[in-house]
Structure formats: C-alpha cells, structure tokens
Amino acid sequence: MSIALHLFVAIASFIAMEATAYLVHRFIMHGPGWHWHRDHHQPSLGLLERNDRYALIFALPAAVLFIVWPGPEYTMWWVALGISAYGLLYMVFHDLVVHRRGWIGRWCRQHIPRSAYLDRLVNAHHLHHAVQGRQGAVSFGFLYAPPPERLRQELKHRANQRDEYRV
C-alpha cells in the first residue's frame, strides 16, 4: 500500500476520533459514566482526576493495534497512529492549554501563540463547563468547536427550557 494511502488512513482515523470523542463525551461521560467524569467539572485539587481513566480507555485500542500490527507496513498500524495523534493533541490542548494542568499547562498557556482557532477552542470548552452538573451542557467535541456565540445562544435556550419545566 502506498504512503499516501497510509497517511489517508491515519488522517481518517484522527478525524474519526473527534466524532468518537464527541459521542463518548455526550452520551457516556455525561450519562452513565458521569461518576468518573464529574470531578472534571469541579475545581481540580491535584494533577490527576478520576476522569483521566477515560484517557487510558481511549489509549487501549491504539496500544492493542500497535502490538498486533507492529510496523508501518500494516494498515492497522496507521489507524493506531491516527488514534494516538488525536490523543496527544487532545492532551496538549485540553489538559495543558485549556485547563492548565500542572506547571507544564501553565507554561503552555503562556507560551503557545494565541490564535483565533485556539481562542475558539478555549471559549467553547469554558462554555461547556458553564453549567452545573451533567445536564444542559454544550460543545462536547474538542478539536472542532462551534462558534461561541452559537453556544451562548444554545445555553440560553436550554436555561429557558429548564425554567419552563419548573413552572
């Protein structure tokens, strides 16, 4: 198989991980898996959170693929590469840049050049954390973030719906 096709497989796997992360975050982490994810929505006291278990779960398929297909001549190795690349970027942007976890996170936030894209990611994620509890949150993906104005409107709409139910 050509290198171009292998790169396509890695990029497609990377993109598929954003869709997977969105679905898992919305329907598992904010659903039956909330007991692990809850501490991520509370002020952090340490470097590790119970929520970090999800990183291990996401890393497991890539690790298995790398072990079973241990070289770039295998298509599944490129799938594992795409999954791993997504995980690395997620960790850098989410844990270090957005949440500033640990001294490395504080350093990243100060030294990584600001851009419209990065500001949009940070704003969208902060809007995700704007609600208390697991219900009513917006923006469940990460490397794609809807415009913050749209998310603010959605939060306002959801708050109005909750108020209507209380009456």
Image (tube, rainbow, N blue to C red):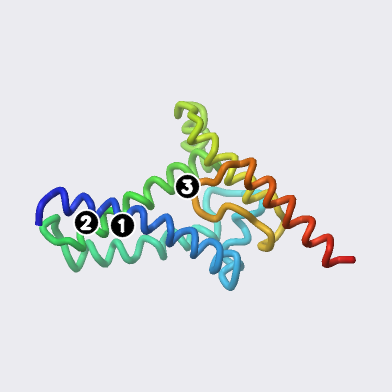
Residue in the picture at 20% in, 59% down: 77
Taking 91 as reference, is 109 above or below it? above
Quickly name the residue at label 3: 144
Q: Are marks 1 and 3 in contact (CB under 8 Å)?
A: no
User: Given the image, on which type of amino acid does mark 3 rest?
Assistant: Tyr
Mark before the other along the chain sequence, 1 or 2: 1
Residue in the picture at 41% in, 62% down: 56
For mark 2, give the secondary structure. Answer: helix
Quickly name the residue at label 2: 78
Task: Check the picture and name the quadrant holding the C terminus.
Answer: bottom right
* Separation (CA) of disc 1 from disc 2: 8 Å
* Crowd band around label 1 with a 10 angstrom C-alpha radius: few (<14), some (14–19), many (20+): many
* Separation (CA) of disc 1 from disc 3: 15 Å
User: Given the image, on which type of amino acid does mark 2 rest?
Assistant: Trp
Q: Position of residue 79 (x, y in %)?
A: 25, 59
Give the side of residue 155 with respect to residue 77, left or right: right
Q: Are marks 3 and 2 in contact (CB under 8 Å)?
A: no
